[in-house]
Amino acid sequence: MFAELKPHLERILDTPILEYSPVHGGDISKAYEVFTPKSKFFVKTSTEPWAEDLFIAEAKGLEQLGATKTIKVPKVYHYGRINGNGYLVLEFVDRKNPNTEDFRLLGRKLAELHLTSTSSTFGAKENNFIGHLPQNNIMSENWAEFYVGMRIESQLEIAVNKGLLSEESVPPKEKTLKICNSIIGPVKSSLLHGDLWSGNFLIAKDGTPHLIDPSVYHGHSEVDIAMSRLFGGFDSSFYKAYYDIMPKHDNPHEITEIYQLYYLLVHLNLFGNTYRNAVLSILDRYFR
Protein backbone atom coordinates (compact mmCIF):
# COMPACT_ATOMS: atom_id res chain seq x y z
CA MET A 1 0.00 0.00 0.00
CA PHE A 2 2.70 2.49 0.96
CA ALA A 3 4.71 1.80 -2.21
CA GLU A 4 1.76 3.09 -4.27
CA LEU A 5 1.56 6.22 -2.12
CA LYS A 6 5.31 6.96 -2.03
CA PRO A 7 5.66 8.95 -5.31
CA HIS A 8 2.74 11.19 -4.35
CA LEU A 9 4.17 11.85 -0.88
CA GLU A 10 7.54 12.71 -2.37
CA ARG A 11 5.85 15.30 -4.57
CA ILE A 12 3.80 16.97 -1.83
CA LEU A 13 6.65 16.89 0.69
CA ASP A 14 9.13 18.01 -1.97
CA THR A 15 11.76 15.56 -0.76
CA PRO A 16 12.81 11.99 -1.55
CA ILE A 17 11.72 9.25 0.82
CA LEU A 18 14.80 7.27 1.76
CA GLU A 19 13.14 4.59 3.84
CA TYR A 20 9.88 3.71 5.56
CA SER A 21 8.89 1.12 8.13
CA PRO A 22 5.54 0.02 9.60
CA VAL A 23 4.49 1.33 13.00
CA HIS A 24 2.31 -1.13 14.87
CA GLY A 25 -0.60 -0.49 17.22
CA GLY A 26 -3.40 1.02 15.11
CA ASP A 27 -6.73 -0.75 14.61
CA ILE A 28 -8.27 1.15 11.71
CA SER A 29 -5.37 2.22 9.48
CA LYS A 30 -1.81 1.32 8.57
CA ALA A 31 0.93 3.59 9.90
CA TYR A 32 4.51 4.19 8.86
CA GLU A 33 7.63 5.97 10.05
CA VAL A 34 8.94 7.74 6.98
CA PHE A 35 12.55 8.91 6.63
CA THR A 36 13.63 11.76 4.37
CA PRO A 37 17.06 13.44 4.15
CA LYS A 38 16.17 16.08 6.76
CA SER A 39 13.07 14.89 8.62
CA LYS A 40 10.95 11.99 9.79
CA PHE A 41 7.20 11.85 9.23
CA PHE A 42 4.37 9.75 10.57
CA VAL A 43 2.01 8.62 7.81
CA LYS A 44 -1.37 6.94 8.18
CA THR A 45 -3.07 5.35 5.22
CA SER A 46 -6.19 3.31 4.53
CA THR A 47 -8.21 2.17 1.53
CA GLU A 48 -11.50 2.19 3.44
CA PRO A 49 -14.16 4.45 1.87
CA TRP A 50 -14.38 6.56 5.03
CA ALA A 51 -10.59 6.99 5.36
CA GLU A 52 -10.25 10.45 3.81
CA ASP A 53 -13.09 11.91 5.89
CA LEU A 54 -11.67 10.33 9.04
CA PHE A 55 -8.18 11.70 8.39
CA ILE A 56 -9.55 15.17 7.61
CA ALA A 57 -11.47 15.12 10.90
CA GLU A 58 -8.36 13.95 12.77
CA ALA A 59 -6.24 16.70 11.22
CA LYS A 60 -8.79 19.38 12.11
CA GLY A 61 -9.03 18.04 15.65
CA LEU A 62 -5.26 18.14 16.10
CA GLU A 63 -5.12 21.68 14.77
CA GLN A 64 -7.94 22.75 17.09
CA LEU A 65 -6.19 21.29 20.13
CA GLY A 66 -2.86 22.78 19.09
CA ALA A 67 -4.39 26.23 18.66
CA THR A 68 -5.11 26.39 22.41
CA LYS A 69 -1.34 26.58 23.12
CA THR A 70 -1.84 24.34 26.15
CA ILE A 71 -0.84 20.79 25.24
CA LYS A 72 1.28 19.77 22.28
CA VAL A 73 0.07 17.79 19.29
CA PRO A 74 1.98 16.54 16.22
CA LYS A 75 2.11 19.07 13.40
CA VAL A 76 -0.22 18.30 10.49
CA TYR A 77 1.51 18.45 7.09
CA HIS A 78 -0.89 16.98 4.53
CA TYR A 79 -3.98 14.83 4.12
CA GLY A 80 -6.02 13.63 1.18
CA ARG A 81 -6.70 10.69 -1.10
CA ILE A 82 -4.79 9.35 -4.09
CA ASN A 83 -5.51 6.22 -6.14
CA GLY A 84 -7.99 4.98 -3.55
CA ASN A 85 -5.62 5.52 -0.61
CA GLY A 86 -6.63 7.98 2.10
CA TYR A 87 -3.60 9.39 3.91
CA LEU A 88 -2.54 11.71 6.70
CA VAL A 89 1.01 13.04 7.10
CA LEU A 90 2.07 14.19 10.57
CA GLU A 91 5.20 15.21 12.40
CA PHE A 92 6.97 12.15 13.81
CA VAL A 93 7.45 12.52 17.57
CA ASP A 94 10.14 10.31 19.08
CA ARG A 95 8.66 8.99 22.29
CA LYS A 96 9.72 7.49 25.57
CA ASN A 97 7.96 5.52 28.30
CA PRO A 98 6.25 7.94 30.71
CA ASN A 99 7.40 8.31 34.31
CA THR A 100 5.60 9.85 37.28
CA GLU A 101 6.64 13.40 36.42
CA ASP A 102 5.55 12.93 32.80
CA PHE A 103 2.08 11.86 33.95
CA ARG A 104 1.98 14.82 36.33
CA LEU A 105 2.70 17.23 33.48
CA LEU A 106 0.15 15.48 31.26
CA GLY A 107 -2.49 16.00 33.96
CA ARG A 108 -1.66 19.69 34.30
CA LYS A 109 -1.69 20.25 30.56
CA LEU A 110 -5.00 18.45 30.12
CA ALA A 111 -6.54 20.62 32.83
CA GLU A 112 -5.20 23.72 31.07
CA LEU A 113 -6.78 22.50 27.83
CA HIS A 114 -10.12 21.95 29.55
CA LEU A 115 -10.06 25.48 30.94
CA THR A 116 -9.53 27.19 27.57
CA SER A 117 -13.05 26.91 26.21
CA THR A 118 -15.14 30.05 25.98
CA SER A 119 -18.07 28.13 24.47
CA SER A 120 -21.36 28.03 26.32
CA THR A 121 -22.64 25.21 24.11
CA PHE A 122 -21.80 21.54 23.70
CA GLY A 123 -20.85 19.74 20.49
CA ALA A 124 -18.96 21.03 17.46
CA LYS A 125 -19.53 22.77 14.16
CA GLU A 126 -18.75 19.55 12.27
CA ASN A 127 -19.34 15.87 12.88
CA ASN A 128 -16.33 13.59 13.22
CA PHE A 129 -15.50 10.01 14.23
CA ILE A 130 -14.90 7.81 17.24
CA GLY A 131 -12.75 5.00 15.92
CA HIS A 132 -14.25 4.74 12.45
CA LEU A 133 -17.82 5.14 13.71
CA PRO A 134 -19.56 8.44 12.98
CA GLN A 135 -19.77 10.82 15.93
CA ASN A 136 -22.59 13.37 15.68
CA ASN A 137 -21.81 16.78 17.17
CA ILE A 138 -25.01 18.77 16.60
CA MET A 139 -24.63 21.58 19.10
CA SER A 140 -26.85 21.97 22.16
CA GLU A 141 -27.07 24.34 25.11
CA ASN A 142 -27.91 21.42 27.42
CA TRP A 143 -25.07 18.99 28.10
CA ALA A 144 -27.21 16.07 29.30
CA GLU A 145 -29.44 16.36 26.23
CA PHE A 146 -26.38 16.41 24.00
CA TYR A 147 -24.74 13.48 25.75
CA VAL A 148 -27.83 11.29 25.74
CA GLY A 149 -28.94 12.20 22.22
CA MET A 150 -25.63 12.51 20.36
CA ARG A 151 -23.65 9.90 22.29
CA ILE A 152 -25.68 7.23 24.10
CA GLU A 153 -28.76 7.01 21.87
CA SER A 154 -26.75 6.99 18.63
CA GLN A 155 -24.56 4.10 19.80
CA LEU A 156 -27.51 2.18 21.24
CA GLU A 157 -29.20 2.43 17.85
CA ILE A 158 -26.11 1.03 16.11
CA ALA A 159 -25.88 -1.81 18.63
CA VAL A 160 -29.54 -2.77 18.17
CA ASN A 161 -29.24 -2.62 14.37
CA LYS A 162 -26.19 -4.90 14.52
CA GLY A 163 -28.00 -7.36 16.77
CA LEU A 164 -25.56 -6.74 19.61
CA LEU A 165 -28.30 -5.51 21.96
CA SER A 166 -31.99 -6.30 22.05
CA GLU A 167 -34.56 -3.52 21.88
CA GLU A 168 -35.79 -4.66 25.31
CA SER A 169 -32.39 -3.93 26.85
CA VAL A 170 -32.49 -0.27 25.74
CA PRO A 171 -34.02 2.08 28.33
CA PRO A 172 -36.45 4.81 27.21
CA LYS A 173 -34.66 7.99 26.19
CA GLU A 174 -36.74 10.08 28.61
CA LYS A 175 -35.62 7.94 31.55
CA THR A 176 -31.99 8.01 30.45
CA LEU A 177 -32.10 11.79 30.13
CA LYS A 178 -33.76 12.27 33.53
CA ILE A 179 -31.18 10.11 35.31
CA CYS A 180 -28.23 11.68 33.50
CA ASN A 181 -29.50 15.15 34.35
CA SER A 182 -29.77 14.14 38.00
CA ILE A 183 -26.29 12.62 38.23
CA ILE A 184 -24.42 15.14 36.09
CA GLY A 185 -26.01 18.42 37.13
CA PRO A 186 -24.86 21.75 35.67
CA VAL A 187 -21.44 21.70 33.98
CA LYS A 188 -19.20 24.06 32.05
CA SER A 189 -18.20 23.37 28.47
CA SER A 190 -14.61 22.26 27.82
CA LEU A 191 -12.72 21.43 24.67
CA LEU A 192 -12.23 17.66 24.84
CA HIS A 193 -9.74 15.27 23.29
CA GLY A 194 -12.71 12.92 23.13
CA ASP A 195 -10.94 9.53 23.16
CA LEU A 196 -8.28 9.76 25.85
CA TRP A 197 -6.99 6.25 26.50
CA SER A 198 -3.35 5.28 26.98
CA GLY A 199 -2.78 4.76 23.25
CA ASN A 200 -3.81 8.32 22.42
CA PHE A 201 -1.11 10.28 24.17
CA LEU A 202 2.64 10.09 23.98
CA ILE A 203 5.57 11.56 25.84
CA ALA A 204 8.33 12.99 23.67
CA LYS A 205 11.95 12.22 24.50
CA ASP A 206 12.26 15.64 26.18
CA GLY A 207 9.25 14.89 28.43
CA THR A 208 6.70 16.99 26.52
CA PRO A 209 3.23 15.36 26.50
CA HIS A 210 1.41 15.16 23.17
CA LEU A 211 -2.17 14.22 22.35
CA ILE A 212 -2.87 12.13 19.25
CA ASP A 213 -5.90 10.58 17.50
CA PRO A 214 -8.49 13.01 18.87
CA SER A 215 -12.29 13.03 18.52
CA VAL A 216 -12.65 16.68 19.42
CA TYR A 217 -15.80 18.46 20.58
CA HIS A 218 -17.01 20.66 23.45
CA GLY A 219 -18.36 18.70 26.41
CA HIS A 220 -17.95 17.98 30.10
CA SER A 221 -14.29 17.73 31.10
CA GLU A 222 -14.96 14.54 33.08
CA VAL A 223 -15.58 12.67 29.81
CA ASP A 224 -11.84 12.64 29.09
CA ILE A 225 -11.11 11.54 32.66
CA ALA A 226 -13.68 8.73 32.47
CA MET A 227 -12.13 7.39 29.28
CA SER A 228 -8.65 7.57 30.79
CA ARG A 229 -9.84 5.27 33.61
CA LEU A 230 -11.60 2.70 31.43
CA PHE A 231 -8.72 0.30 30.80
CA GLY A 232 -6.83 0.44 34.08
CA GLY A 233 -6.26 4.18 34.32
CA PHE A 234 -3.17 6.36 34.18
CA ASP A 235 -0.59 6.86 36.93
CA SER A 236 -2.10 8.42 40.09
CA SER A 237 0.11 11.49 39.63
CA PHE A 238 -1.88 12.35 36.50
CA TYR A 239 -5.17 12.56 38.41
CA LYS A 240 -3.68 14.45 41.35
CA ALA A 241 -2.15 17.06 39.05
CA TYR A 242 -5.38 17.36 37.07
CA TYR A 243 -7.58 17.85 40.14
CA ASP A 244 -5.14 20.32 41.65
CA ILE A 245 -6.42 22.58 38.87
CA MET A 246 -9.90 21.29 38.01
CA PRO A 247 -12.61 20.84 40.67
CA LYS A 248 -13.82 17.31 41.31
CA HIS A 249 -17.40 16.40 40.47
CA ASP A 250 -19.82 15.75 43.35
CA ASN A 251 -20.59 12.24 42.05
CA PRO A 252 -17.19 11.00 40.83
CA HIS A 253 -17.93 7.25 40.67
CA GLU A 254 -21.35 7.62 39.06
CA ILE A 255 -20.22 10.21 36.53
CA THR A 256 -17.29 8.04 35.49
CA GLU A 257 -19.54 5.05 34.80
CA ILE A 258 -22.15 7.15 33.01
CA TYR A 259 -19.48 8.51 30.65
CA GLN A 260 -17.75 5.16 30.25
CA LEU A 261 -21.04 3.77 28.94
CA TYR A 262 -20.48 5.69 25.71
CA TYR A 263 -17.03 4.25 25.18
CA LEU A 264 -18.15 0.74 26.06
CA LEU A 265 -20.95 1.05 23.50
CA VAL A 266 -18.41 2.22 20.93
CA HIS A 267 -16.21 -0.79 21.69
CA LEU A 268 -19.23 -3.07 21.50
CA ASN A 269 -20.09 -1.69 18.06
CA LEU A 270 -16.49 -1.85 16.85
CA PHE A 271 -15.30 -5.13 18.34
CA GLY A 272 -18.39 -7.15 19.23
CA ASN A 273 -19.83 -9.10 22.13
CA THR A 274 -16.74 -8.96 24.37
CA TYR A 275 -18.11 -5.64 25.66
CA ARG A 276 -21.79 -6.59 25.86
CA ASN A 277 -21.88 -7.56 29.54
CA ALA A 278 -20.10 -4.37 30.59
CA VAL A 279 -22.66 -2.29 28.67
CA LEU A 280 -25.61 -4.20 30.13
CA SER A 281 -24.16 -3.89 33.63
CA ILE A 282 -24.20 -0.08 33.48
CA LEU A 283 -27.60 0.04 31.78
CA ASP A 284 -29.05 -2.21 34.50
CA ARG A 285 -27.37 -0.34 37.35
CA TYR A 286 -28.48 3.14 36.38
CA PHE A 287 -31.41 2.98 33.97
CA ARG A 288 -33.69 0.12 35.07
Image (tube, rainbow, N blue to C red):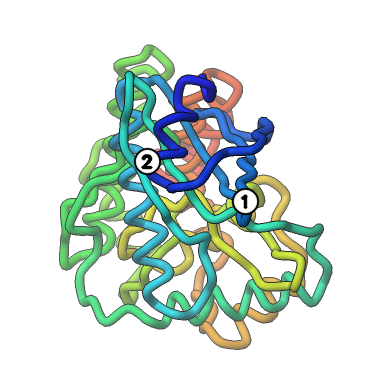
- Residue at 44 percent across and 80 percent down: it is 69
- The front one of 242 and 66 is 66
- The front one of 151 and 180 is 151
- Residue at 32 percent across and 77 percent down: it is 188
Question: Residue 231, how many percent across, how many down?
Answer: 67, 45
- 123 vs 11: above or below: below
Taking 61 as reference, is 75 left or right?
right
Question: Residue 24, how many percent across, how many down?
Answer: 68, 33
The mark tally for this picture is: 2
Name the residue beneath numbered marker 2: 55
Q: Amino acid at mark 1?
A: Lys
> In the rendering, which numbered label is found on residue 40?
1
Instruction: Judge the density around disc 2: few (<14), some (14-19), many (≥20) Cα neighbours within 10 Å.
Output: many
* Local SS, label 1: strand
- The front one of 272 and 107 is 107
- The front one of 73 and 110 is 73
Question: Can you tell which quarter of the image residue 273 is in?
Answer: top right
Question: Residue 195, how many percent across, how many down?
Answer: 49, 51
* Local SS, label 2: helix
Instruction: Judge the density around disc 1: few (<14), some (14-19), many (≥20) Cα neighbours within 10 Å.
Output: some
> In the rendering, which numbered label is found on residue 101?
none
Extreme top residue here?
163
Q: Which mark is in front, 1 or 2?
A: 1
- Residue at 23 percent across and 58 percent down: it is 124
- Residue at 50 percent across and 28 percent down: it is 28
- 133 vs 73: above or below: above
Q: Amino acid at mark 2?
A: Phe
Taking 251 as reference, is 57 left or right?
left
Specify the quadrant that holds the C terminus: top left
Taking 116 as reference, is 3 left or right?
right
**Tag 1 and tag 2, C-beta contact below 8 Å:** no
Question: Residue 148, how many percent across, how many down?
Answer: 28, 48
